[in-house]
Amino acid sequence: MAAHNATHDDRTAPRGDRGDGVRDSEIRIEQTHLDRVYHRLEEKIHEAEFLMDDAAKRGQVGTPGALAERDAQVFRAGVHLNRLNSEFEDFLFGRIDLLPGKDGRRGPDGAYTSVEPADDAIRTGPDGDRAEIAETLHIGRIGVLDADYAPLVIDWRAPAAAPFYRSTPVAPGRVVRRRVIRSKGRRVLGVEDDLLRPELSATLDGGALPVVGDGALMAALGQARGHTMRDIVASIQAEQDQVIRAPAASITEVEGGPGTGKTAVALHRAAYLLYQDRRRYAGGILVVSPTPLLVAYTEGVLPSLGEEGQVAIRAVGSLVEGAEATTYDTPAVARVKGSSRMVKVLRKAARGALELPRGSAGAAGSSPSSSSSALSSSSAASSSDHGQLTLDGALDGALDTHGGRPGAGPGARPGGPPERLRVVAFGARIELDADELRTIRQNALGGTAPVNLLRPRARRLLLDALWTRSGAPRRYTDPELAAEAREGFDEDISSEDSFQEFLDAWWPELTPRSVLAAMAEEKRLSRWSRRVLNPREVRQTARSLARLGPDGQGPLSVHDVALLDELTTLLGAPARPAGPREADPLDQLTGLDELTTYADRVSPRRSRAERAERERADYAHVIVDEAQDLTPMQWRMIGRRGRHATWTVVGDPAQSSWSDPEEAGRARDEALGSRPRRRFTLTVNYRNPAEIAELATKVLALAMPGTPAPEAVRSTGVAPRFVPGADGGLGEAARREAVRLLDEVDGTVGVVVAMNRRAQARQWLTGLGDRVVALGSLEAKGLEYDATVVVSPAEIADESPAGLRVLYVALTRATQRLTVVASDRDVPNENGVPDLLRE
Ligand SMILES: Nc1ncnc2c1ncn2[C@@H]1O[C@H](COP(=O)(O)OP(=O)(O)OP(=O)(O)O)[C@@H](O)[C@H]1O
């Protein structure tokens, strides 16, 4: 596609327009239609309010069935009301004028179903081709029918709306004119038309079909950017529409360069899937985004499309319940933590942590005070119902687990797990020593089951060993009597608090955070990562984990979160006694849309943990944005959340900040499984003007030689600006350029720096207001600004092995203007152009 010159003047210059008179009268026509739509919406709101009232009255009937019905009705009416009451900025945004359909058939919404025009739709005569418009459809965020069930507005996701997006001058189908309507609240502000069959003289109600403006896309692209992304529902392009409406089954993979609309398309696809099969996707759609900044940037898109609630947009560093990554690791550490080699290390750590002193691996439920209660309960030796079994007070090991405490008895390694279990049974002392306990532990740990879930097995093996040691098996020849005695033996020993205390110390319940924190000890990590990590990697990784502190509650890095998730799987959730679950009236209902999520939201009866656990596995569809950045460990984490899901994966290998794409590719294949894949490529850059795209392409050629760049769709006529900043004056130059750009553009300005300059860059911009932001190179991912200042390309490129690709990302964030500030390291030429950006 040729770059389109979209200066302000050009955009507003009418093409087929015959003056403001036509524009105004066309606006009036659309206003009349919008008034009808709002009148109908008001009627629907009254209906919904009546439904709510009626439901409230039913609530007085107390049968569970009636209550459930009321809840469902209130819920449905509430959703309906909410959607209708939402102040959609441009509720009605499109219109298509169509030729009659080939087969003359109409669908349930009253629109012709055929994509192709009827054979006799176009009449060829001496003055050229002529046709009469047979059908006009208005497209909006939700569908509205009039009282006779004729469509006033077609939902943008309905099949009848597809020609609005799909038709092109090359393949117009039935569409003669496509119109984008701009409105605010209830007022139509403007219309922009595209004529898809310009050669045709078309008439509408006997008059010529007027054409106003120069197309909506250019108008949309030229608008100033704010701090949040806008939906593109009024100007989705044909290649994007193919992705949005691709069938949900299996896996949809989308690649495309910067600015091709991958994020926008992914979010619109979520809305489309919900429209297509609300019941199925009410199970939840997960959108995984690389950074919290991108989450905040994109969060408003789905509500603007009328979809809220069913879609969770999460940063990859916040995917684990309760974990919120706030820091970034250095590239070297990130490389280790992201690598699938960590699986082996974590497996060892999860099992090895059982050997650690209590407190260092966070044994839940085994506090120091519970140890001293072991002392008192065990010293008051109890006598059993059998009168023959006594638990000795000398559970030395259990008491010694907090090494160095006064009263620590012999037989325990200071600071380590208990090394001796001693009980009195059948009038005799029975003891298991360190070697025996170790063998029992190893037997219990056999296989790959989660460590916390093996505690009952370990407990049983301990009791087996004590029973054998007691000599009792030899005393009972009658198997029935033996079984009965054994039952009593087990019951008596396990019911003692002190035995429980021993177990807590010897097989503590491990938490993922505490195991991760335990890995901060270099020697220990070296043991757990033998033959997997080299000494340098061990040292760097251990040092980075020290941030977590001894209790593991310190700040997590983005890459720590995937490790936590892996550990959660390796450790398993500790067994909890299952509490009785009250019947939820909403659960009894079937066949109602959105109930699952509603029940989830409102039911206080379901525990947080239960919800978190379900959330881990139960997404119906997973959308991964910026997929090229995920590390193997992150793919494993996301894979766990989409085991039964269908997927949409969007990304651009040329923007990957991960150093080993092949390793990540394998992990991605594993997460996605063997289901068939449907691949799409987006080819048009809607963000960058051609001048900026051209500069970025130079870096692309270095970062990924041979990769085609997407074609920029417009041009501003303004080339990127280069400013030598010299090291001492970098901040000054960056600030000066930011100020200049704030003056030149209406919207936002982003100043992108190498990650280690983030704090400094924030200082540089102090006092410039909230239209300007400082960003580390990795944080710029997915975002866009009217103008950007990229500070020292060389520093960004040298940051990591993927530095050139990260620089490519930084250079492709601007919609209008780009300034590059060079440091000495950039070796700028006399025009300030850094070495990297020259031919
Ligand atoms: N059809 C369209 N109509 C109007 N604007 C569009 C369209 N497609 C994309 N855009 C705009 O282009 C910009 C880039 O879109 P988006 O961020 O989705 O691209 P991306 O491919 O995810 O980019 P990146 O890979 O750089 O993150 C956004 O401002 C988006 O709104």
Image: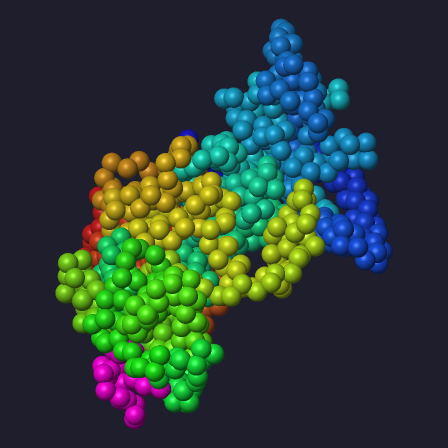
Q: Which stretch did the figure color magenta?
A: 393-422
Q: Percent position (x, y) of residue 747?
A: 50, 56
Q: Quadrant of the N terminus?
A: top left
Q: Which of 127 and 154 is in front in this view?
A: 154
* Colour pattern: rainbow
Q: Which residue is drawn at 24% across and 36% down?
A: 706
Q: Nearer the viewer, residue 121 or 458?
A: 458
Q: Percent position (x, y) of residue 697?
A: 30, 42
Q: Which of 425 and 296 is in front in this view?
A: 425
Dominant SS type (magenta): loop
Q: Can residue 418 be seen in this view?
A: no
Q: Quadrant of residue 799?
A: bottom left
Q: Is residue 398 magenta?
A: yes
State left or right for residue 763 relative to residue 795. right
State left or right for residue 225 relative to residue 356. right
Find the residue positioned furthest to the top: 126
Q: Which of 72 and 678 is in front in this view?
A: 72
Q: Residue at x 72, y 50 (%)?
A: 72
State left or right for residue 701 relative to residue 44. left
Q: Percent position (x, y) of residue 162?
A: 58, 30
| Rendered position, 386 above or below 671 | below
Q: Quadrant of residue 136?
A: top right
Q: Residue at x 38, y 70 (%)?
A: 509
Q: Which residue is drawn at 70% across and 54% down?
A: 585
Q: Quadrant of the C terminus?
A: top left
